[in-house]
Amino acid sequence: MILAALLAVAVLWLTFGGKLVRDRRNWPAIGAMAIGIALLAKGELVPALLLTAGGAFWLRRPKFRKPAAKPFAQDMQLAEARDLLGLSPDAGRDAIVAAHRRLIARNHPDSGGTEALAARLNAARDLLLRAEPQ
């Protein structure tokens, strides 16, 4: 009975604290946990544990998100790519690679930079290397 009361308090605290209610996809999990708590209070241990564990699993499931689009890769022009890498219009393959290495070392997310800037630097390098005559 004490366990049921503790579980009920936890669900109510999370629900009315606003952490679970904001996302309506969590409501079935809240309902399953509430029914599980009621069954636990009646002494139905197995269904109660299944429902509360299922509700907890539902709340902990990974949230599926759309993959992030490659930022700026489609819109970047050659002049913008050269400016971003600090290159002159007559820069060759070696200069492009060296400028990219120098800038990405400072601006990579692992070095304290942002993902967006690193993606722009990579897109600029790729665009300039594709445009470079073989």
Image: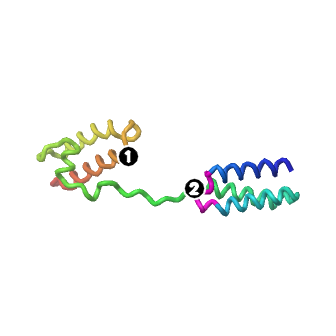
Q: What x and y, as percent, mark residue 26?
A: 63, 59
Q: Which secondary structure is most common in the magenta stretch?
A: loop
Residue drawn at x 16%, y 45% is: 92
- Residue type indicated by callout 1: Glu
Q: Which mark is residue 106?
A: none
Callout 1: 10 Å neighbours few (<14), some, many (20+)?
some
**Side (left or right) of 38 relative to 92:** right
Residue drawn at x 75%, y 59% is: 34
Q: Secondary structure at mark 2?
A: loop
- Residue type indicated by callout 2: Pro
Quadrant of res 110: top left
Foreground residue among 5 and 94: 5
In the picture of the structure, the residue carrying the numbered disc 2 is 62
Q: Quadrant of the C terminus?
A: bottom left
Callout 2: 10 Å neighbours few (<14), some, many (20+)?
few
Q: Which stretch is magenta?
A: 18-26
Residues tagged 2 and 1 counted as in contact (Cβ below 8 A)? no
**Side (left or right) of 79 relative to 68:** left
Q: Which mark is residue 115?
A: 1
Foreground residue among 93 and 56: 56
Determine the CA span between mark 2 and mark 1.
22 Å
Q: Earlier in the sequence, mark 2 or mark 1?
A: 2
